[in-house]
Amino acid sequence: MLAHTGRDEARVVATQFVRALQQHDIVVRMLKDEAADLGVVPDDLEVVEAAVDAAAGCELALVIGGDGTILRAAEVTHESGTPLLGVNLGHVGFLAEAESDDLDFTIDAIAGRRYSVEERLTIEVQVYRDKELVASNWALNEASVEKAARERMLEAVIEVDGRPLSRWGCDGVVCATPTGSTAYNFSAGGPVVWPGVEALLMVPISAHALFARPLVVSPSSVLAVEVLADAVRAGAKCAGVLWCDGRRTVELAPGARVEVRRGRTPVLLARLHQAPFTDRLVAKFGLPVSGWRGATGRRRSPSPGRDRLPDA
């Protein structure tokens, strides 16, 4: 279990889940710092140090928090391939599957193994300087190349599959997965892509260019962003910043090249409901659907679970 223990609500909910799971004879493991934050540590709680193998041997990773907490949990579970089950305490919670007030239902589903697991495409990110690999990273949602100085634009040449496409003066460039299409990509004006679609996305942020539209390319394509050295003021050591899932950063020197390709290891998400992604969009964004009657001319029953259409 991983939790946003900086929030009072998360600590209360996490403690409730730990005790409820233990009543079903399920062994619960937590990171040492987070377990300490709970205050009163429940009996028989496994406590481990934070490390890339912290989730090794676990059947499921239960995440208490918002999408940011789930992205942090993905860092812990990525190497072990442990599925993530998010309990939403955030605002939108696109990656979360359950709500905090669904404790009994969620516990029963975990105890009875009544959940499915789906793969989510990830991206691998490599940074080159003078053709030398200087940094490697990965992301579930997106990798964004952003300007380092507020007062200056980022000058970049965009490349797809080894061929130059355009030059953009912009605030940045977002390279996203379908999972990340409802995150930074969405805010930057990119398209919403259903999770079942395998594709890579590239979206400019506030670009000054004739051709500056969002791009959707094959999952086998390689995207590249080259930061132009001649457009950076003399003596500047940092021309831009690479962000992976908004959590991990790499400074980009003038002339740096960022390559983005499909990741070899997907992230696994546990699902309790089979509601269509369309219903999730409606529920999470509060989209207006009143008046809809469906192809048969009558209103269909909403899908079971929390992600359902509001009453018309």
Image: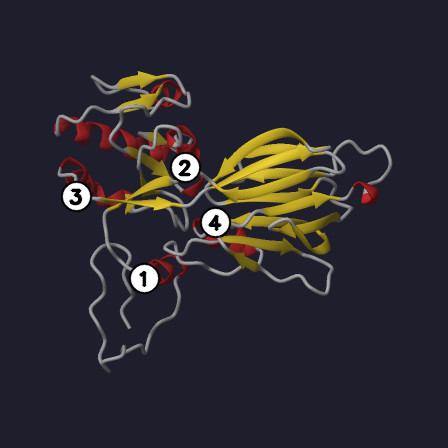
**CB under 8 Å between callouts 2 and 3?**
no
Specify which label sits upstream in the sequence, 4 or 1.
Answer: 4
Q: 148 or 125: nearer the eye?
A: 125
- State the separation of the CA atoms marked 2 and 3: 24 Å
Res. 279 mark: 1
In the rendered structure, which disc, 1 or 3, sits on the residue that comes first in sequence? 3
Q: Which residue type carries mark 1? A: Asp
- Closest to the observer: 85 or 105? 85
Q: Disc 2 vs disc 3: which is toward the camera? A: 2
Report the Cα–Cα distance between label 4 and label 1.
20 Å
Label 2: few (<14), some (14–19) or many (≥20) C-alpha neighbours in 10 Å:
some
Q: Amino acid at mark 3?
A: Arg
Assess disc 1: are there few (<14), some (14-19) or many (≥20) residues with their C-alpha within 10 Å of its C-alpha: some
- Residue indicated by mark 3: 114
The quarter holding residue 61 reads top left
Q: Position of residue 173 (x, y in %)?
A: 63, 49
